[in-house]
Every structure is written in structure tokens, then in C-alpha cells.
């Protein structure tokens, strides 16, 4: 008796087709998820950029006394990601123009192109950024002209209300500028020009710092301390460099009405060779109105417009006097992680 049976090769071929079909479904599902999840990550990156920009812009307005949430947040969200939604913009308790923090939260719908074939639909991505502002720990972009904290009655008066502006002439002679912070003891050759990097003091370097600012961070210490206890806040002078080669860079600052930041020192140590070491305690924002860097050294000066504003630097130290200078920084990128704020 003969028994009809399916050949073994045909049976194997049918099994392979079933396995291939099942595998293709799984592979297509994985590919669909990969494409849509990748789209979600890209949307998330755009949202992080958007919440960062909106929070930074809002913080700048809060520093200037405006309501940054009302003036900037929505506009920056729309400019950076028109399809995003501004979920919230809020400030931390106790925030003021002097110090505080603002949080901006945004989200956007992520279009699922392939996931619906496996029963999944569109989903949301979100981002939250917190930016803080306050007094600087350190500042970059400084111009190399130190100011004595007690060297001018007009400067002292302005510090009583640093939200205002004031035009003050600061003498830069051998005797008037640094000596007032040294108990009126003479500091030969030092006119308050600062050597930030402790180098060889070439004139070209001082000219570059005058026009473009020093690109490193410069620290401030505690009012009343000295270089003996706070060496990190102390920088050497640049003897005899308040001179005619500075005229070009200074004219550039004056003519372009550039706002820049200067360090303020409260004491100094005399060093060998007629040099000095200046102890920085805070910073001020100014514009240059007029100057004289030639002729009789006793008649040389900077006339500065003191004003509040932002500086580039490290945030935040609110223990010192308020000089109107604030810095801002992103301190948290997730509303559940405000540990750095």
C-alpha cells in the first residue's frame, strides 16, 4: 500500500515563509518605532533650545526690572519653535531685579508616522529650563582699568543707588587712583591698569584688552579682606601703561558707546620693582564718555557713565554690595531637578 505524503523539502519551505512573514512584521514594527522615536528625540532637542532661549531672555528682562515672563517668554518660544506651546513661565519665590530665578516650560506634539500600524499614535515631548541671576562670582570680558572702591565721593554716592546712572571722572595719575585704597601711601608707577594674566605686560596686550576685553574669568573676593587671605581675587598692576597708545582702543569704546565691565579693588599690596597687587571685590558696568592718556600724568583721566546691566561671568554671589552688575546662567534643565538653582 502506498501512502501519499508531502515531500520534506516542501514542508520546510512553507515553514520558512511563515517565519519570514512574522519576522518582517517585527522588523517593520521596530523600524517604525525607531523612526518615530528618533523624531521624538529631535523634537525634544529643539524644545530644550527653545526653553533655554526663552528663559535666558526672560531673565535678562527681570534683571532690568521688567516682567520677563510677560515680555519675552512667548515671543522667544514662537521664534525658536512655532509649533511649541508655552506651558508655564514663573519666578522663584523672593525673586527681584537683584537676584532670582525664572523657569520656562514648553511642549510640542510629535507626529507618529509609522507607529499607528502597530496601534500607537502621536505623543508629546517637553522641556523645562530654569535660569538664575544675581551678583557675579567672576566676570569675563573685563577692561584693564581698576577702580578704587573709596577713591571718589561721587562713585561712593552712586553705589548708594546703582539702579541709576551717573557720569563720574576718575583720575588716572600716579598718586590719585590706587593710592586712595592704600591709606594714601604712594604706589610708584601703578595707575590702576591691571595685568590680568600675570604675563610680560606688552602694550599690544593691554590695547587688545582695552578694545575687546580680557577673555579669561576674573574673580572677586570679600570686601575688607586682603591679598594675604584671598590670593584668588588678586591681580598685579601694569606700571606706567596708562599712556598714549591706549588712545585708539579707548576712542573705539567711546565712539561706539560700548558698555563694558570694570573691576573694583579695595586694597593693594606693594610688590618689588614698583609694582602692586590689587584685591578685587566687585564689578561695575560703564560707558566711556571722555579720556586723556597723554600730557602731564597728573591730568590723565577716564570719564565714565556708571549704569546697571548684565555682564558675562559665573553666577551667583549675592553676599557683597549691589553694584547693579548681574550675571545669568542656566541652572536646571528639568523642572524636577532644580538642585543647582
Image (spheres, rainbow, N blue to C red):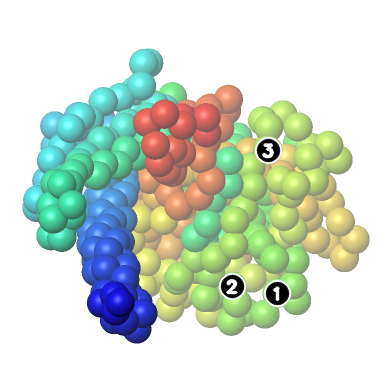
> Earlier along the polypeptide chain: callout 3 or callout 2?
2
Identify the residue under disc 1.
Answer: 201
| Contact check, label 1 and label 3, Cβ < 8 Å | no
Taking the spot 43% from the left edge, 49% from the top edge, the residue there is: 311
Which numbered tag is attached to residue 222?
Answer: none
Assess disc 1: are there few (<14), some (14-19) or many (≥20) residues with their C-alpha within 10 Å of its C-alpha: some
Question: Percent from the top left, x then y, of residue 250?
Answer: 43, 69
The CA span between labels 2 and 1 is 7 Å
Of tags 3 and 2, which is closer to the observer?
3
- Residue 275: in sight, yes or no? yes
Label 2 element class:
helix
Residue 17 appears left or right of 320: left
Identify the residue under disc 3.
Answer: 221
Question: Percent from the top left, x then y, of residue 296?
Answer: 58, 67
The CA span between labels 1 and 3 is 24 Å
Taking the spot 15% from the left edge, 47% from the top edge, the residue there is: 119
| Contact check, label 2 and label 1, Cβ < 8 Å | yes
The CA span between labels 3 and 2 is 23 Å
> Earlier along the polypeptide chain: callout 2 or callout 1?
1
Taking the spot 22% from the left edge, 30% from the top edge, the residue there is: 89
Label 1 element class:
loop
Assess disc 2: are there few (<14), some (14-19) or many (≥20) residues with their C-alpha within 10 Å of its C-alpha: many
Identify the residue under disc 2.
Answer: 206
Question: Percent from the top left, x then y, of residue 100?
Answer: 39, 27
Label 3 element class:
loop
Taking the spot 87% from the left edge, 65% from the top edge, the residue there is: 273
Q: Is residue 22 above or below residue 51?
A: below
Residue at the right extreme, as displayed: 272
Residue 314 appears left or right of 260: right
Amino acid at each position: 500500500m502506498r501512502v501519499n505524503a508531502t515531500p520534506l523539502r516542501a514542508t520546510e519551505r512553507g515553514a520558512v515563509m511563515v517565519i519570514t512573514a512574522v519576522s518582517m512584521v517585527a522588523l517593520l514594527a521596530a523600524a517604525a518605532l525607531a523612526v518615530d522615536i528618533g523624531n521624538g528625540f529631535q523634537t525634544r532637542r529643539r524644545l530644550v533650545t527653545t526653553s533655554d532661549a526663552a528663559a535666558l531672555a526672560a531673565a535678562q528682562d527681570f534683571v532690568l526690572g521688567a516682567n520677563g515672563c510677560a515680555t519675552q517668554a512667548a515671543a522667544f518660544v514662537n521664534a525658536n519653535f512655532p509649533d511649541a506651546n508655552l506651558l508655564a513661565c514663573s519666578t522663584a519665590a523672593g525673586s527681584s531685579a537683584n537676584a532670582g530665578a525664572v523657569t520656562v516650560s514648553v511642549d510640542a506634539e510629535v507626529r507618529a508616522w509609522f507607529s499607528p500600524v502597530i496601534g500607537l499614535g502621536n505623543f508629546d515631548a517637553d522641556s523645562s529650563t530654569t535660569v538664575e541671576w544675581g551678583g557675579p562670582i567672576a566676570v569675563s570680558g573685563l577692561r584693564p582699568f581698576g577702580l578704587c572702591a573709596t577713591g571718589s565721593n561721587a562713585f561712593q554716592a552712586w553705589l548708594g543707588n546703582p539702579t541709576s546712572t551717573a557720569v563720574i571722572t576718575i583720575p588716572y595719575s600716579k598718586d590719585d587712583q590706587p593710592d586712595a585704597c592704600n591709606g594714601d601711601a604712594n604706589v610708584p608707577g601703578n595707575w590702576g591698569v591691571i595685568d590680568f594674566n600675570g604675563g610680560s605686560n606688552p602694550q599690544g596686550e593691554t590695547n587688545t584688552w582695552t578694545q575687546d576685553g580680557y577673555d579669561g574669568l576674573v574673580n572677586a573676593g570679600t570686601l575688607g579682606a586682603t591679598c594675604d587671605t584671598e590670593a584668588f581675587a588678586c591681580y598685579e598692576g601694569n606700571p606706567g601703561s596708562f599712556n598714549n597708545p591706549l588712545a585708539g582702543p579707548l576712542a573705539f569704546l567711546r565712539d561706539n558707546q560700548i558698555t563694558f565691565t570694570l573691576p573694583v579693588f579695595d586694597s593693594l599690596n606693594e610688590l618689588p620693582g614698583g609694582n602692586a597687587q590689587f584685591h578685587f571685590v566687585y564689578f561695575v558696568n560703564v560707558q566711556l564718555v571722555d579720556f586723556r592718556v597723554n600730557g602731564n600724568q597728573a591730568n590723565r583721566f577716564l570719564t565714565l557713565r556708571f549704569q546697571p546691566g548684565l555682564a558675562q561671568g559665573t553666577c551667583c554671589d549675592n553676599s557683597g554690595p549691589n553694584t547693579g552688575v548681574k550675571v545669568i546662567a542656566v541652572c536646571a534643565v528639568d523642572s524636577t531637578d532644580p538642585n543647582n538653582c
